[in-house]
Image (cartoon, rainbow, N blue to C red):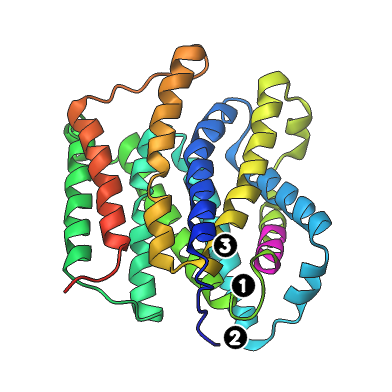
Amino acid sequence: MKRHVPSGRRGLGIGLALVTAFSWGTLPIALKGLLTATDPFTITWFRFIISALLLGCLRPGDFHAATRLRGKSLLVMAIAAVGLGASYITYILSLQFLSPSTTQIVIQLSPACVLFGSLLFFKEPFGLRRWIGFVVLALGFALFFNQRFDELFAGVNDLTIGIVLLVGAALGFATFALCQKLLLSAVSSTAIMFPLFLAGALLFTPVSQPMDLVQLQGTDIALLFACAAISLISFMAYSTSMRHLETSRVSVVTATAPLFTISGMAILAWLAPDRFQGESLNAPSLVGAGMVIIGSMLGSIGSSK
């Protein structure tokens, strides 16, 4: 397969990456609220099937483009589908054990995984700046969890289970991201996402309970459709941004997602305290969150020897 070369339209790429960051930042809040009404597998199935249906209606010709894939391209598509499905389900499962802000901080491992994959498969350069970024990232994690060190090292508990699930989500997402980067040299971003969404819907159909969704009311219905819409918008924006920017530059922008999560949770805890609980983040935790974001950005910016 040919290596994909970005279009160079950096303004458009950055704008789309910002849309992705905002979407990913608000998604865990919506998912956390919805988990009180239905199970993770049904939510994941609904996110996939709505995204597939909407994309299929908006861009029906893309399905035919995807069906023309053969050989290695078809294998890469299958691997991307598994990675995306694994990322979706392990991420929402982690929200049963962790708060939205915590999940969004830990999932910053995703850009690091994408970066290492880019170094391996796309031969992107690695230098001192990136090493500094990873050190800052690690120190940021330590500060963010400064109030929970005892829990973190106390064996198996909600915190450790949630973190393990998020590591799985990060690896699954990195697999998807690297595969779709390879596929962009053969088909468009929408032609990639439609079969991936369809595959995800089929994958989770046996373990979902669609009839449970009929019983949802009011806010839960709004959250359900918000999750589905965010899924489609964020991944379409992400895939398209990769067409215009290098993988590393996209990762820099999407690293800001935790800012939207932390600020969103603070606002919602004030507006609807009965549904959204405030998060007890002290000053070192907030500094650590900032360091995680900065470290992720530094790790994604180009090489500096």
Q: Quadrant of the N terminus?
A: bottom right
Determine which residue is flagged by label 2: 72
> Residue 194 at x, y = what percent?
71, 62
Q: Main secondary structure of the magenta part?
A: helix
Is disc 3 in contact with disc 1, using a CB cutoff of under 8 Å?
no
The local secondary structure at tag 1 comes to helix
Residue denoted by label 1: 78
The residue depicted at 16 percent of the width and 74 percent of the height is 305
Q: Is residue 16 left or right of residue 188?
A: left
Residue 265 falls in which quadrant of the image?
A: top left
Q: Residues within 10 Å of mark 2 (few under 14, many from 20)?
A: few
Inspect the image, locate mark 1, and give the three-letter code of the amino acid beneath it.
Ala
Residue, x 33% and y 70% (percent of image)?
116
Residue 160: % across, % down: 31, 42
Count residues near mark 3 (Cα–Cα under 10 Å), then give few for <14, some for 14-19, many for 20+: many
Q: Is residue 126 magenta?
A: no
Residue 239 - label = 3
Tell me the CA gap for discs 3 and 1. Answer: 17 Å
